[in-house]
Image: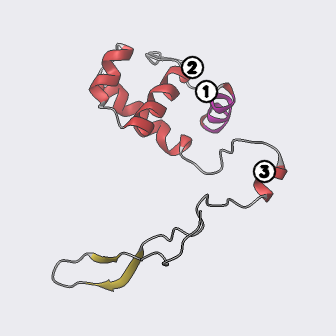
């Protein structure tokens, strides 16, 4: 968690302004709120009550930190050996759904076609 805080601080610069009113929460606490919101989709008002700040402040922190935290350039490992290994899906026989490329002019939505699994699937 401290590594994430350092990486976020390196990307955004100083969290607290040099002059003027200080932010209510420190960067670590704001990251925790943003992660809880992203993971559990908790209502912002409830997060504000837990942290003793307003819902509007929670919303501002999430709007500011979500793109930085969700950025794929923030890796869990700093070593090049981790990035060289391709991600393997745990169930390679499970196929993702197929999306049609044609667009329905009546509803302006793309269609969804479920893909069926083969008869003999071994896990």
Q: Is residue 110 visible?
A: yes
Which residue does the numbered mark 3 point to in the structure image? 82
Q: Is residue 7 magenta?
A: yes
Q: Is residue 17 visible?
A: no
The colour scheme applied to this rendered structure is secondary structure
Q: Nearer the viewer, residue 64 or 48?
A: 48
> Could you tell which of marks 2 and 3 lies nearer the N-terminus?
2
Classify the position of the N terminus by image quarter.
top right
The residue depicted at 33 percent of the width and 86 percent of the height is 102
**Image location of residue 21, percent across then percent down:** 44, 15
**Label 1 close to label 2 by CB (< 8 Å):** yes
Tell me if mark 2 has few (under 14), some (14-19) or many (20+) residues whose alpha carbon lies within 10 angstroms of its own.
few
Residue 9 position by quadrant:
top right
Bounds of the magenta segment:
3-11
* Marks 2 and 3, how far apart at CA: 38 Å
Numbered mark located on residue 47 in the image? none
Which residue does the numbered mark 1 point to in the structure image? 14
* Marks 3 and 1, how far apart at CA: 29 Å
Q: Secondary structure at mark 1?
A: loop
Q: Is residue 88 magenta?
A: no
Q: Which of the two marks, 2 or 3, is nearer to us in this view? A: 3
């Amino acid at each position: 968690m401290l590594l994430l805080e350092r990486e976020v601080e390196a990307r955004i610069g100083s969290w607290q302004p040099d002059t003027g009113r200080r932010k209510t929460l420190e960067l670590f606490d704001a990251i925790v709120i943003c992660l809880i919101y992203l993971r559990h989709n908790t209502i912002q008002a409830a997060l504000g009550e837990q942290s003793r700040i307003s819902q509007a402040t929670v919303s501002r922190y999430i709007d500011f930190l979500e793109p930085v935290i969700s950025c794929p350039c923030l890796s869990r490992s700093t070593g090049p050996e981790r990035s060289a290994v391709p991600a393997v899906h745990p169930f390679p026989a499970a196929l993702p759904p197929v999306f049609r490329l044609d667009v329905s002019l009546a509803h302006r939505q793309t269609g969804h076609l479920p893909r069926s699994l083969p008869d003999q699937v071994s896990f």
